[in-house]
Image: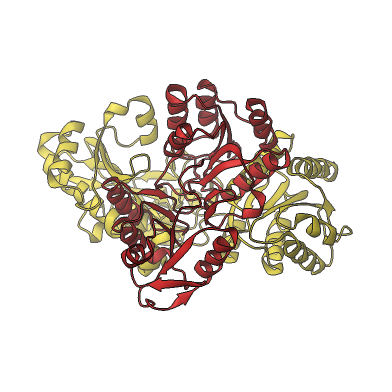
Chain colours: A red, B yellow
Amino acid sequence: MSILVDDDTRVVVQGITGGEGKFHAEQMIDYGTNVVAGAVPGKGGEEAAGVPVYDTVRGAAREEDADAAVIFVPPAFAADALFEALDSPVDLVVAITEGIPQQDMASVYKRLQETDTALVGPNCPGVITPGEAKLGILPGNIFSDGDVGLVSRSGTLTYQVVDSLTQRGIGQTTAVGIGGDPIIGTDFVGALERFEADPETEAVVMCGEIGGEDEEEAAHYIAENMDTPVAGFIAGRTAPPGKRMGHAGAIVGSSGAGTAESKINALNDAGVPVGDTPEEVADHIEGFL
Amino acid sequence: MKLHEYQAKGVFADAGIPTPASQLAETVDEAVDAAEDIGYPVAIKAQVQVGGRGKAGGIELVDDADEAREAAERIIGMDLKGLHVGSVLVEEAVDFTNELYLGVTMDRNEGRPVAMVSTRGGVDIEEVAAEDPDAIAREHVDPAFGLHPYQARRAVYDAGVDRDVAGDVASVLTTLYDLWDDRDATETEINPLMVTADDEVVAADAVMNIDEDALFRHPDLAEMEDETAGDELEAKANEYGFDYVRLSGNVGIIGNGAGLVMTTLDLVDYYGGEPANFLDIGGGAKAERVSNALDMVFSDENVDSVVFNIFGGITRGDEVAKGINTALEQFDEITKPVVVRLAGTNAEEGMEILNTELVEVEGTLEDAVQRAVERAQEVAQ
């Protein structure tokens, strides 16, 4: 079992004729992902990464039964690509694009609330169910099949933690990179709900960071609703207030909102151990299994 | 991107928001001339992009030319919270009976903009929000429709604004939202909006921050960016296209991916060191980017050692190692010890390739950070 994606997922890649879109579509296919089509306006009828390209996402979904879209579209056009995916039959959208204007995302977010579609991202590495499918840019070779779910706001931090787990022989059910932007689709709670419902996920790692209140909400959710044990990590303990630490969403307010301390305390209060180092997170997970 | 007060006031005034008469001055003589022109009393206000200017001595009210000269001499060129004051805004002093707060920002937890009004203007609104959240009236906005007129009115009435100025304040709030929306702002704020004895409203301060990811569609605003406004190294990082934040410690940090770089900073602290910076080199690590990153960190005189932590995903460790070797070979002398840790795809091959005459190599993140902290302590002694 897994969450969000598996070997039945049929993927359409928006922006498949661009440099990144093509490269990562090929990487996804090499990993075994069932990429069935591309969607690029004006390129209908062509072929890219060995799959047919359609002018519209709806066309790709109808003709190739695609049920998930991955978006590699430049930031200026990404909101339109997101609206198109949300107005198509696909029920999962994974947006990799970094740098989408915040107000564009607010409009997309509003539309998202009116649909049943799940959105992962934007500004994220994607979703991987090891051995089955990856939607995005995650390096498949560091993941292994197993019992631990992982949800993270950061790409390379995910890889670091997965590497620690994999070296101890601990594999993953699914890893979800939810993205580093202030406005995202699936948040921690959204991913944790799915892991809680997945019978194969025996433990969950959540990697948070400074900014916003998603981790605090997740702590509340875990305390109230989860039986599956969770271990956490929070990046940005040393971040100064008012400075954006790489991710658009990773910022502590000038009066101290969104600090690592607040998140760590909330998680500890919910009974979630938080590692001081990525290795300590792996220690906690090992203890759960 | 933050606009200076005088720039934001210009944008607000063009949109019809009442602002006091003012002139920008870069020299003491210009400031005195402006003050004479406007008529006393005037406020001399440091143009730096930081809150709490008044408390830090960056704003002074003056009554005549001598006082104006004295204040301008003191403020122009001063160091205010670490920022150099290059200019002052000379502004008509407004006689007020009340100070209001008006602001529009993105509520990230709701994924929607929020317009706010409070009668507790003139102080740090985040402090008000923390102490007494009910003192701020909030209206969440559906971006598809914008701020409805009834919402602007409701916010003003809920906040308890004096009825005689309620209509004018609602109108300013509507304009503030429209500016936020049209100009891709992350924040528009007037604090305080002064209410005068004869029921006029005047924006005595102006804050406008623009979403950097949206600057491509606002070339006029992009031109207003003051590259000298921040730290010198931060400006250089901007040029190189790095996400960089300068801190005060002595362990330089280079890595890839925001979360992992933040974690590296945290680990430096955890192992008893002090991080000097956040530098995200981004995807890939071609020799040019590596050498630019090293150049940045080496040119920070506080730095005593460097930890270089790359988790290769799609980028292969052997390619990163070649980039690091090539970059380091370009330096005549490596003045500060560099500790490298590579992980992920082809990391082992990468670590074999690394030129250990130029760098120290560690196998884990924890070991690399501890080594860099030790080296910094040795160098500092």
Q: In which quadrant will I find the N terminus of chain B?
A: bottom left
Residue visible at 85% across and 42% down? B378
How far across and down, in percent of the image, does residue A283 sit?
69, 30
| Foreground of the two, B324 or A117 | A117
| Foreground of the two, A156 or B171 | A156
With A227 as the anchor, is B219 left or right in this view? left
Instruction: Tell how many labels.
Output: 0
With B248 as the anchor, is A43 left or right in this view? left
Residue B302, placed above or below residue B334: above
| Foreground of the two, B299 or B62 | B299
Residue furthest to the right in view is B357
| Foreground of the two, B228 or A178 | A178
How far across and down, in percent of the image, does residue B255 sit?
67, 53
With A174 as the anchor, is A102 left or right in this view? left
Residue B139, placed above or below residue A223: below
How far across and down, in percent of the image, does residue B218 sit?
35, 66
Residue B351, placed above or below residue A148: below
Residue visible at 82% across and 68% down? B329
Q: Examine the image and state in which quarter residue B160 appears.
A: top left
Q: In which quadrant will I find the C terminus of chain B?
A: top right
Q: Is residue B359 in view?
A: yes
Residue B100, placed above or below residue B70: above
Q: Is residue A257 in view?
A: no
